[in-house]
Image: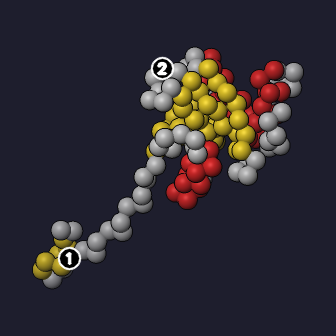
Amino acid sequence: MPKEKDPILKKLQELGCNSQFKLAIAYQVYLDLSEVRKLQVESRYNKELDIIYFVGKGDEFPNGSEIFIPLSSASFLSMSWIETLQQAICQDREGPRITMAFKEQDSSVMYYCMTTGIIPPDPPSPPILKKPGQLSTE
């Protein structure tokens, strides 16, 4: 964790998140967005979900900005959590689109964009027996 005198870290702490782990991940993602990707970054905090997130502004985004969710690469995500996140954070935007920013142990960050309409796939069809002992998936 960086020194507490760091202005970026201080700004993140002032958002209201008390988890040092979440602050450390958010700090690394903030640096990647602002220093590596050269985006204008606005820090935000959702108290109900206890999550720090960023709005990055740049010409490469369809709406002029993108929402980034800093997470550990070891985070467990469920479809219902992603839907809850989209509903809570993307209320004022057309077509809730968020980008998950997964911080790896080596401090690299992987980005995955997610949009609404993600539906879990149907369960696979049971195999059909063609001949005794032979399976088919048709």
Q: Is 45 placed above or below 88 here?
A: above
Amino acid type, mark 1: Ile
Residue 54, placed above or below residue 97:
above
Determine contact: label 1, label 2, CB under 8 Å: no
The picture places residue 97, in percent across and down from the top left corner, at: 50, 41
Q: How many marks?
A: 2
Residue highlighted by disc 2:
59
The quadrant of the picture occupied by the C terminus is: bottom left
Residue matched to label 1: 128
Please say whether residue 86 is visible from this viewpoint: yes
Residue that appears at 67% across and 27% down: 42
**Quadrant hosting residue 36:** top right
Where residue 22 sits in the image (x, y, percent)? 73, 40
Closest to the camera, between mark 1 and mark 2, is: 2
Residue sitting at 50 percent across and 26 percent down? 64
Q: Residue at x 79, y 36 (%)?
A: 15
